Amino acid sequence: MNRFFRMLLATGVLMVATGAIAADNDADARSVDAGGVSQQFIDPSDMSQVPRLTRKVLFRAITKAKRGEHADAIATLEEHLRDHPDHDHFLVRYHLGASHDALGRYEDAKLQYTRSVEMEPRLDSGWFGLGHVEYNLGNYASSGAAFLKAFRTAIDPQPETLYFAAAGYMLAEDHETAAPLLDELCSGKWGVPRHDWYAQLAQCAITLERPGLAEDRLEHYLQIQPDSHEAWFLRYQFEVGFERYREAAVSLTIVGYLRELTPREQRTLGDLYNVVEVPALASDRYRRAMDGDDTSAEDYERLVSAYVAAHDLDEALAALEEGLKTDPTVRLWSLLGDIHYMRQEYAESARAFARVAELDPENGRPLLMIGYCHIEMGNRGLAIQNLVQAAKFDDQKDLAVRLLKRARKLKQA
């Protein structure tokens, strides 16, 4: 049984043919009161109003379809229409559509489903089938519209059908139409809202740049599920979508109280704390992200940068020395040179930048920094030597020339 028919069974809209066809008793169409307006619905299993000849052919076709003999079912129904054109019926068209659908003949199925709902607009299973084939044909807006019709005309509306309608509109990038459908689902009118309904409503709000579309619903979600890490993670994603990074950091921190954050999430939380200028908390999260075996040079760079921003140069230096043992990249050597320079440890800084120059000879900055260090140490000759080399690089030339003037004023060592 393919996915479509499993979905039909799950939502209760697949026709129950056997007992209904055999029964010959009358069954009135049901009605419900919608805001004071009586609306008639079609029960697709009710065959009492179907002419006897049509009932018999439907029984044969449905029996074949249940055995998976869809091509034979189609032939049976088409023969009936050819031999008895005055006995056309919306259920004949519906079952033709269902068998074409089961065989993956979506254009043919669309034609038959469309005919069935033209003949009987209250046939929710016809609208549902049309929504399915429009989806498979990539006609997402039409799919959403058909699923919405299926939901509004159903005897027992299933919230999944309304969700399919919203999903179709979202795939068609019609978030304006999808948003109120998702809001209806999240209202609780159709049962306890599901996480993915809230998530899609939040996505609509982000896409439309209108936080008010989802804010109240998400707040209610957190009120009824305060211990749900999924709810708090969704809130974090929502806040990031509107660039409210402080609130996003708080939400992701709460997620960490409810479940263990992955190294990637710890790193993201560190980035958020960096953005909101809380480097001490950022460095803590970066360090936690490095507990695994796949720590990279980039992880050490983040950690060191956070320590520097927090003015904790001792920790920055310790982290760099650890990182250089793991992955001695140019960037880490360069950071080591910068930190030694900030600590006024000019000899150590010069040695680190010498290593950078060796690893990256196309970069003039390490030569410039070595020149800086030797000026600070009073080494006139070494300062001039490195600055002359740095001046050969266009991006360092102006500053190197100015520093050369300074270096030449130094007393000869």
Image: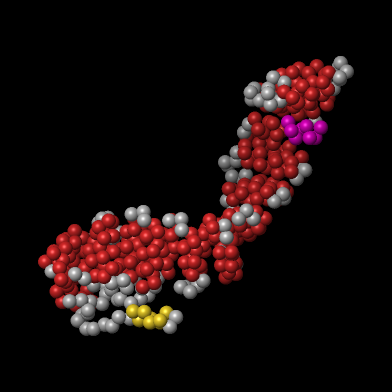
Give how far across and how far down residue 154 sits, in percent.
Answer: 36, 73
Q: Quadrant where the N terminus lies?
A: bottom left
Instruction: Identify which residue is drawn at 43% across, 64% down.
Output: 163
- Residue 12 appears in which quarter of the rendering? bottom left
Give how far across and how far down residue 341 sits, in percent.
Answer: 78, 32
Q: In this rendering, would 151 be left or right of 115?
A: right
Instruction: Identify which residue is drawn at 66% across, 39% down.
Output: 301
Q: In this rendering, would 38 be left or right of 212?
A: left
The residue nearer to you, when weighing 111 against 53, is 111
* Above-or-below relation of 317 to 39: above
Q: In this rendering, would 75 be left or right of 42?
A: left
Which residue appears farthest toward the left when viewing the image?
A: 83
Q: Quadrant where the C terminus lies?
A: top right
* Above-or-below relation of 51 to 379: below
Give how far across and how far down residue 349 sits, in percent.
Answer: 76, 29
Q: In this rendering, would 343 be left or right of 255?
A: right
The residue nearer to you, when weighing 82 against 158, is 82
Instruction: Identify which residue is drawn at 28% across, 72% down.
Output: 120
The residue nearer to you, when weighing 55 against 361, is 55
Range shown magenta: 337-344
Instruction: Identify which residue is drawn at 66% across, 25% down.
Output: 363
Query: For the stretch drawn in magenta, what is the main secondary structure?
Result: helix
Give how far across and how far down residue 130 sits, in percent.
Answer: 32, 63
